[in-house]
Amino acid sequence: MMRRSFQVAARLGHHRALLRTPCILPRLDPAAAFGSSTDSLVSRFCPVKTDLKDYALPNASWCPDMLSLYQEFLEKTKSDGWVKLPSFKSNRDHIQGLKLPSGLVAASDKSDWRIFTRCIQVEGQGYEYVIFFHPFKKKSVCLFQPGPYLEGPPGFAHGGSLAAMMDETFSKTAYLAGEGLFTLNLNIRFKNLIPVGSLAVLNVQVEKVEDRKLYMSCITQSRDQETVYAKSSGVFLQWQLEEESSP
Amino acid sequence: MMRRSFQVAARLGHHRALLRTPCILPRLDPAAAFGSSTDSLVSRFCPVKTDLKDYALPNASWCPDMLSLYQEFLEKTKSDGWVKLPSFKSNRDHIQGLKLPSGLVAASDKSDWRIFTRCIQVEGQGYEYVIFFHPFKKKSVCLFQPGPYLEGPPGFAHGGSLAAMMDETFSKTAYLAGEGLFTLNLNIRFKNLIPVGSLAVLNVQVEKVEDRKLYMSCITQSRDQETVYAKSSGVFLQWQLEEESSP
């Protein structure tokens, strides 16, 4: 989710460049350093103490497959280096203490903001998901259970709901693995439909980092890996936010 | 939305094939005909009389840009061949009278289904959009205003919400222009962020139809076309549903 805030910087930086001279990449500060370690990024992203509600926790709507795989990965956080990522209501909660570049805060009189993948708060009706990240392997696993408000064809998840889930999982992984902030490209090949209420498992991997871009892949399958729902790739641009200075 | 129901057929057809022999395309019936004219598809898709609520109508949350462009296109429906597409709560409403292939109806005890892009029913908070289609030109224009529940970076729409809007607009166009039903590929290049509450205009065009595939493109821009938000392409497989037989 933090990556999103960096996208503001990157995209609006690009936006301004675009108004002057059309080009694809934002104009980066050549002096910018990408020195934050994965460990420090993860520590910041997963606060031990917080009053914020974490939506990535089991509830009564989770299907048995989702619950049991969640427990499996929770065990792996104790010994195998996996980290469970918290999921707050808004990215505004995730970027506390980080400074958005000037001009990148959109003016608004609205007060109730929600990150898109937490837009429906009734348990089981919309997005149910939890992401586990492995800092050393630079990979993530997202357990995703679409509810009946995510429908496309009768009884099955909308392709767009899976696209958004992929984008969100890519973005978390890109940020934590290497300050990947700006989504440049998302390419999805759909294979099969995901039944509403069932579990889909997204396996995301950072393939390479080159010229300040992270190249990532994702395969979405049933738990038994018998059914491939979709394959996708994403390219993210690195960007670094600064700490807010003390008032 | 009807295309979604066809995706059930296509994807599950593929699913079954996949369990036997991995392959990308569903196994089509070589005898299948694609004889429905665009006019007859549009007539069926846009019923003159219905009790169903059409969500693609102006409400108090629409920004002035969205309202005025809507009025412009509404004028074009009178003389320039454009058609305003209705948008019901669920695809179940759109496929009345059409037969899903056997085994493609997912069992469920849930009763409140919503198409993903109408998942939030509070005006202005989620998706606000309306699609106009031009049967002769085989193109569509979608007016899209993301609300604060579609947020990604603070104050801006989540990339996944735009991806879903593209997928939905592609699918409508693909179905009405040539019974394109099964999304094979979606490729998006993001350029700039869309501010929450503002208007983004999606221009979708069928580029070619070849080997039972529709190749489509989309450019998403601000109304004045000064800012490109994203460019995308989609490939859809043709599939035809049959009429339900009388009981």
Image (spheres, coloured by chain):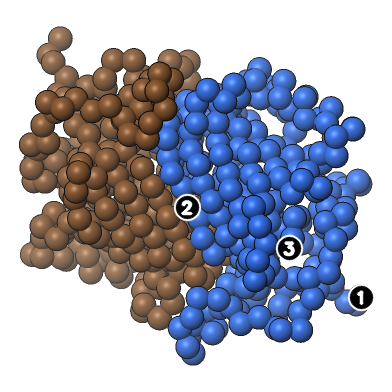
Chain colours: A blue, B brown
Quickly name the residue at label 3: A179
Residue hosting label 2: A187
Residue B147 visible within the image: no
As helix, strand or loop, the secondary structure at mark 3 comes to loop
Q: Position of residue B63 (x, y in %)?
A: 42, 67
Q: Residue at x 71, y 45 (%)?
A: A139
Residue B31 visible in rendering: yes
Residue at the spot of label 1: A246
Q: Which amino acid type is marked by label 2?
A: Asn
Q: Of marks 3 and 1, which one's residue comes earlier in the chain?
A: 3
Q: Amino acid at mark 3?
A: Glu
How far across and how far down the image is residue A30, in percent? 71, 84
* Place of residue B76 in the rendered image (x, y in percent of width and height, measured from the top left): 15, 65
Tell me if mark 1 has few (under 14), some (14-19) or many (20+) residues whose alpha carbon lies within 10 angstroms of its own. few
Q: Nearer the viewer, mark 2 or mark 1?
A: 2
Name which residue type carries label 1: Ser
